[in-house]
Amino acid sequence: MSIYDTIIIGGGPAGLSAGLYAARAGLRSLLLEKSFLGGQAITADRIENYPGFPEPISGLKIIQNMEEQARKYNLAIVVREVKSLEAKEGKFRIYLEGGLEGELEPELENKLENGPENGGLLLSQTVIVATGASPIRLNVPGEAEFTGRGVSYCATCDGPLFRDREVVVVGGGNSAVEEALFLAKFARKVTIVHRRSALRADKILQDRAFQNPKIHFLWNSVVQEIKGDSQVRAVSLQDLTSRSLTTQPTDGLFIYVGSKPNTAWLPPAVKLDDKGFIITDERLSSSLAGLFAAGDCRQKPLRQIITAASDGALAGMMAYHYLQEKT
């Protein structure tokens, strides 16, 4: 069975950058993505802080450019979810949900073997984990019930559905304020509910939100329950100062209270911090030799598209140097 030099797991900015650098370095590389390329980046309607783009650009466009560039250097990209991996006899065994027949380039098809439960098995000398993070849920009554029926985690995806309606945005960071500004293009009224008395977003975003006549604020408040019938109709809010409860009528609820890393599938040999983020050294190497981490899934102080791309570039080159040092 043929062996890859590196397999990248995750197709967001970190994974695509890792694939670009690994492929350019001459490594036999494969990128695996479980659903669609881009991750959370493609939900950003307007990005203003990515160097090299003086005018705003969408996250989707950045990802499309990254994919085009990576494919230019013959990076193989396959849509398939990774079930698990293990390090054995100096190689990584990657088990997939379902096979890969018909999806790989013809010259790569012989690299697939049957794995457990009729899945697929791939072998690689190194792995770059770039699985990103997923939105944190509020875990309040009604959230699961009304997800897709008024509860959303993506204003770019669902915002146009709320034209001339009233919506609530939960959160106070950059994502919450950016999406509130986007929603204000469609909604009649946008209410930002934040558990603190001040926003944490960048000042330029705060200024825009405060100056927008459609955007209103409820401070020191949290969502206790989401109510409705076939759709969201209201949210129950608690004032953290007075402990009083109020009902806020709304047609939609957009939640931006942080993210959690997609790392639960990793073996115990990969050390995680108390929040589940992968612990790495300055070379982005994890506690498991040959396994690198890049992007939002690893422990670091700033999670942005540009830092994910930087991580990916470094991880791709560190995988290359790791293999060079082994020979």
Image (cartoon, rainbow, N blue to C red):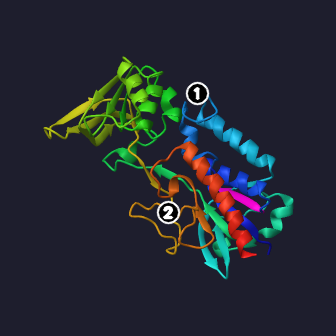
* Residue 144 drawn above or below residue 127: above
Could you say where residue 221 lies in the image, as x and y percent from the top left? 24, 38
Inspect the image, locate mark 2, and give the three-letter code of the amino acid beneath it. Answer: Ile
The residue singled out by tag 1 in the image is: 56
The quarter holding residue 28 reads bottom right
Q: Which mark is residue 127?
A: none
- For the residues marked 2 and 1, what is the alpha-carbon distance in whole angstroms? 31 Å
Could you say where residue 196 lies in the image, as x and y percent from the top left? 26, 39
Q: With 132 as the anchor, is 326 left or right in this view?
A: right
Q: With 233 as the anchor, is 240 left or right in this view?
A: left
The reply to whether the C-beta atoms of the residues labelled 2 and 1 are less than 8 Å apart is no
* Residue 107 drawn above or below residue 44: below
Q: Which element is circle 2 on?
A: loop
The residue singled out by tag 2 in the image is: 278
Residue at the limit of the structure toward the right, as seen here: 107
Residue 150 visible, this orientation:
no
* Count of residue discs: 2
The quarter holding residue 89 reads bottom right
Residue 52 visible, this orientation:
yes
Q: With 198 as the anchor, is 117 left or right in this view?
A: right
Magenta residues, start to end: 28-33
The quarter holding residue 26 reads bottom right
Could you say where residue 102 lies in the image, as x and y percent from the top left? 80, 58
**Which quadrant is home to the C terminus?**
bottom right
Q: Residues within 10 Å of mark 1 (few under 14, many from 20)?
A: few
Which of marks 1 and 2 precedes in the sequence?
1
Residue at the limit of the structure toward the top, as seen here: 213
